Image (cartoon, rainbow, N blue to C red):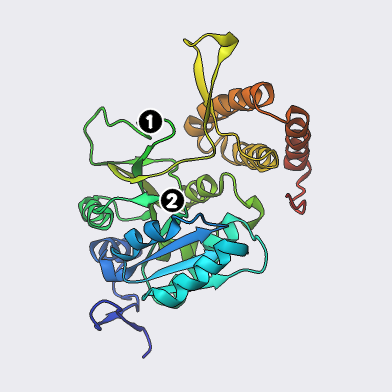
C-alpha cells in the first residue's frame, strides 16, 4: 500500500505522503503537531550490554510501539542475551553487525530502518540509559507546545548518578529552549529533517557524533530543542573524582574512557571547531576552552599517560591532514 504504514499499536494506517499544497515549513509544523506514539520508533545501540539491559529495554518497550536494536558485534553472554530477547519480546527487531561499526554508523542503520518502516520520528538511546515512566508522554507534550516549525532534534534533561546531579539546571523555569547541541541518548529525531540533512558522520565513529549532527541541522535551518524535564538516568564514561594539588576545594571529575577514545575526542572536536568557529562562535569558543582544559587534566591525572599522549597526537595530526581512514581501536 503505497504511502501508508500499518500502525503496530492499533492497526490503523498512517499516511506518509507529503502534502504538496503545503509550504515546506507548514509541512514541518504539521508533522510536529502529528507527533504521536504510533509515529515514533525507538533505536538502541548496543555493544556488549550488561545483564541488566533487559530491564532497561522493557522500560522502553512499554512506551514504544516498535523498538529496533542495532548491535555492534557483541559476543559471548551479551550475544546470547540479545538473541533470547529477540525471541522473547514482541515489537522488537535487531540489526546484527559483524564488527563494531561505531555509534554513528549504527545510528544511521537504525534511522534508515525507521525510514523504511515509514516512521516520522526516531528516539535514540544508549544501552545504559534508563528512561522515566512518562518519557514518551512528556516528550510528545513538549513537542506539541513548540512554537517553531523546523525541528531537527529534541533532547531532554537527565540525571547522572555518577556525578550526583542533573545535566542542566532550569533557573528560568522554562519548559524547553533552543540549543546548539544535545546528546544523542534520549533525543527524538525528525526523520524528515534526517533525510534532508543527511546521515550521522560515519568517520566520527563515536565522539562528537551528536554535536556534529545538531550543528549540521542548524546549518540547514533546523532547530535543536532541549526539554528541561528530567526524563532519564544517564552516565557518561567511568567517572572518577580527582583533587587538584590534593586539595578537596578543587575537585573535578574525569570520564576515564579507554585510551583510544582520546583520539576521536581530539580529532573530531578539532574538526568541529574548524568548521563552525565562524558560524557558531558562541558555542565553539567556550566549548573549546573547557575541553582543552579537560584534555590537559586527562594527560595529568588518568592512567596510561604516554598512551593517551600518543592517541592525542594522532588525533591532532589527522584533524590537520584530513586523514579519516585510521581505524582505532
Mark 1 residue crowding within 10 angstroms, few (<14) / some (14–19) / many (20+): few
Position above or below: 255 against 126: above
Left or right, 98 with respect to 115, comes to right
Q: Nearer the viewer, mark 2 or mark 1?
A: 1
Residue 192 appears at what percent x and percent y?
41, 66
Which quarter of the picture shows residue 163? Answer: top left
Quarter of the image for the N terminus: give it: bottom left
In three-dimensional space, the C-alpha distance between marks 2 and 1, rounded to whole angstroms, equals: 18 Å
For numbered disc 1, what is the local secondary structure?
loop
Please report whichever mark, 2 or 1, sits nearer to the chain's N-terminal start.
1
Classify residue 111 as left or right of residue 31: right
Judged left or right of residue 126, residue 6 is left
Nearest the viewer among 177 and 298 is: 298
Using the image, determine if residue 218 lies above or below residue 68: above
In this rendered view, identify the residue nearer to me: 29 or 297: 297
Q: Nearer the viewer, residue 172 or 75?
A: 75
Q: Which residue is under mark 1?
A: 164
Amino acid at each position: 500500500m503505497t504511502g501508508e504504514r500499518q500502525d503496530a499499536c492499533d492497526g490503523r494506517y498512517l499516511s506518509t505522503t507529503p502534502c504538496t499544497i503545503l509550504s515546506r515549513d507548514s509541512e514541518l509544523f504539521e508533522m510536529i503537531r502529528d507527533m504521536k506514539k504510533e509515529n515514533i520508533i525507538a533505536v538502541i545501540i548496543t555493544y556488549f550490554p550488561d545483564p541488566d539491559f533487559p530491564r532497561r529495554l522493557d522500560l522502553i518497550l512499554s512506551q514504544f510501539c516498535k523498538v529496533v536494536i542495532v548491535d555492534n558485534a557483541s559476543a559471548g553472554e551479551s550475544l546470547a542475551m540479545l538473541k533470547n530477547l529477540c525471541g522473547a519480546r514482541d515489537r522488537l527487531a535487531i540489526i546484527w553487525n559483524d564488527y563494531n561499526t561505531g555509534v554513528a554508523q549504527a545510528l544511521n542503520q537504525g534511522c534508515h530502518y525507521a525510514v523504511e518502516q515509514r516512521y516520522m520520528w526516531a528516539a535514540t538511546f544508549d544501552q545504559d540509559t534508563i528512561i522515566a515512566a512518562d518519557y514518551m508522554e512528556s516528550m510528545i507534550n513538549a513537542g506539541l507546545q513548540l512554537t517553531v516549525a523546523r525541528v531537527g532534534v529534541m533532547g531532554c534533561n537527565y540525571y547522572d548518578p555518577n556525578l550526583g546531579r542533573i545535566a542542566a539546571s532550569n533557573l528560568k523555569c522554562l519548559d524547553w529552549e533552543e540549543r546548539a547541541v544535545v546528546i544523542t541518548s534520549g533525543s527524538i529525531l525528525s526523520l524528515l529533517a534526517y533525510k534532508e540533512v543527511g546521515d550521522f558522520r560515519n568517520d566520527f565513529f563515536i565522539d562528537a557524533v551528536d554535536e556534529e549532527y545538531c550543528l549540521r541541522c542548524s546549518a540547514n535551518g533546523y532547530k535543536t530543542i532541549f526539554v528541561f524535564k528530567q526524563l532519564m538516568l544517564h552516565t557518561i564514561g567511568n567517572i572518577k573524582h580527582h583533587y587538584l594539588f590534593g586539595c578537596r576545594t578543587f575537585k573535578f571529575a574525569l570520564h576515564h574512557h579507554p585510551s583510544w577514545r582520546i583520539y576521536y575526542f581530539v580529532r573530531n572536536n578539532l574538526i568541529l571547531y574548524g568548521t563552525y568557529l565562524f558560524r557558531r562562535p558562541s558555542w565553539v569558543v567556550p566549548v573549546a576552552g573547557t575541553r582543552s582544559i579537560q584534555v590537559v587534566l586527562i594527560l595529568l591525572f588518568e592512567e596510561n599517560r604516554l598512551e593517551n599522549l600518543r592517541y592525542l597526537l594522532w588525533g591532532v595530526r589527522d584533524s590537520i591532514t584530513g586523514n579519516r581512514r585510521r581505524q582505532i581501536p
